[in-house]
Amino acid sequence: MADSSNCFYCREDLGGKRFVRNEGRPVCVRCHTKFCANNCAECHRPISVETKELSHKGRYWHEECFRCAKCYKPLAKEPFSTKDDRIMCGKCCSREDAQRCHGCYKPILPGIESVEYKGNSWHDECFTCFNCKRPIGSQSFLSKGSDIYCSPCYDKKFAKHCVSCKKPITSGGVNYQDQPWHSHCFVCSSCSKPLAGSSFTNHQDQAFCVDCYKNCVAKKCSGCQNPITG
């Protein structure tokens, strides 16, 4: 704007010069920047009439200062959001609002494969066995305290091992003479018939089914020749 008035502040003759009106009063560009201009919310310097001013919810920015608070991407011509009075681009705002991975503590962004367990979330690749460190993926797993184990590692570390085959007992099993057995490993010492749930007899620390005990172990009556099993 050009006029022949004087600047309200410095009284400089504004004839033929550029000036602005502040509350109806003529003000030269220099004085406007010094006394009237809004301060940039980012750099805190005044925004002169010679630069482009952007505003949002009562705050003002130089065009080049209006950028994402996280990645510093210029947002003058881009969609943006606000969070806790911070200006952010859509991508950074999504990261800010996203759940955090319980393993790496980085955000789990929309569309990323994740696992939820006991109120916590993990990236798919961060949900790993405490022992072998391999991702659990779609395989079964067990927990011990706050630690997660794949089934093979859990069995190797915590399961009882059969006294016969030395392999872990993952379900069922038989306890005999304070030692664990797989049901299919606890068999008659003579005929290998499974003894779990059946009557059997111990002889010299060996288990025998009733028939084998009668035929192979029990003493015979001198009179009738039948085995003495009582």
Image: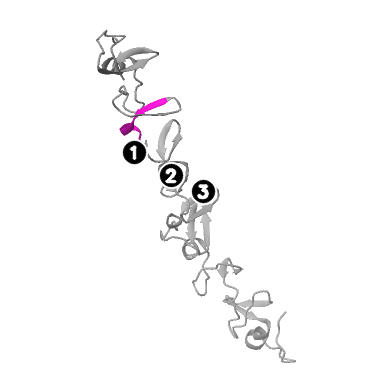
Of marks 2 and 1, the one in the foreground: 1
Q: Secondary structure at mark 3?
A: strand
**Quarter of the N terminus within the rendering:** top left
State which tag comes first along the sequence, 2 or 3. Answer: 2
Q: Is residue 71 left or right of residue 210?
A: left
Picture residue at 35% right of the left edge, 33% below the top: 66
Farthest right residue? Answer: 224
User: Does 64 lie within the magenta span?
Assistant: yes
* Region of the chain picked out in magenta, as a range: 59-67
State which tag comes first along the sequence, 2 or 1. Answer: 1
Residue identifier under label 3? 120
State which tag comes first along the sequence, 1 or 3. Answer: 1
Give the x, y percent position of residue 108.
45, 49
Q: Quadrant of residue 3?
A: top left
Give the x, y percent position of residue 40.
34, 25
Picture residue at 41% right of the left edge, 61% below the top: 134
Q: Is residue 49 left or right of residue 159?
A: left
Of marks 2 and 3, the one in the foreground: 2
Amino acid type at image mark 2? Arg
Give the x, y percent position of residue 42.
34, 28
Q: Is residue 38 above or below residue 224?
A: above
Residue identifier under label 1? 74
Separation of disc 1 and disc 3 at Cα? 35 Å
Amino acid type at image mark 1? Pro
